[in-house]
Image (tube, grey):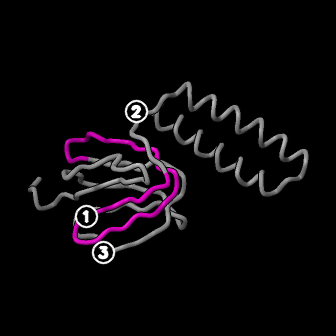
Amino acid sequence: MADNSVLTISIVTPDGMVYQNDQAYLVIVKTKTGELGIMHDHLPVIASLEVDEARVKYDNGKEDEIAVNGGFVEFSNNVLTIIADSAEKQGDIDVERAERARDRAQQRLQEAQSKHDNKTITRDQIALQRAINRIHVARH
């Protein structure tokens, strides 16, 4: 593949740069309206992201997976930037810690549901979704 047919991708969070690469062939993210695949010369786009994985593919078949917890994606001039609330590369995820977070979120969610505390239910559902996403990416 010619160098001019690749993408540059950056994933940043409030804590700083999580991922950067300038050799991506395809990036797949889940937006609020569905899955979005972006390749070289895609039309410019800005979209809100779901809590899900970002998959970065290379022309040699290699793939990087990053757990992305909300935020948005912006693409123009073959540069893709994800601004995420938080994000972790697959190899950086502590599965035991993510499982403990999942268990705590499930417990808090059950307690909030029994009290009909909608604000807490929403917060705990998001925490549960983030923990499950991290576990999924780590084990994939």
Q: State the CA–CA distance, disc 1 to disc 2.
A: 24 Å
Q: Position of residue 62 (x, y in %)?
A: 26, 39
Element marked by disc 3: loop
Mark 2: amino acid? Asp
- Residue underneath mark 3: 43
Element marked by disc 2: helix
Q: Position of residue 94 (x, y in %)?
A: 48, 28
Mark 1: amino acid? Val
Q: Closer to the camera: disc 1 or disc 3?
A: 1
Q: Is residue 101 magenta?
A: no
- Residue underneath mark 1: 79
Disc nearer the start of the sequence (1/3): 3
Q: Closer to the camera: disc 1 or disc 2?
A: 2
Q: Residue furthest right?
A: 115
User: What range of the chain is rendered magenta?
Assistant: 58-85
Q: Position of residue 108 (x, y in %)?
A: 77, 40
Q: Closer to the camera: disc 3 or disc 2?
A: 2
Disc nearer the start of the sequence (3/2): 3
- Residue underneath mark 2: 92
The image's mark for residue 23 is none
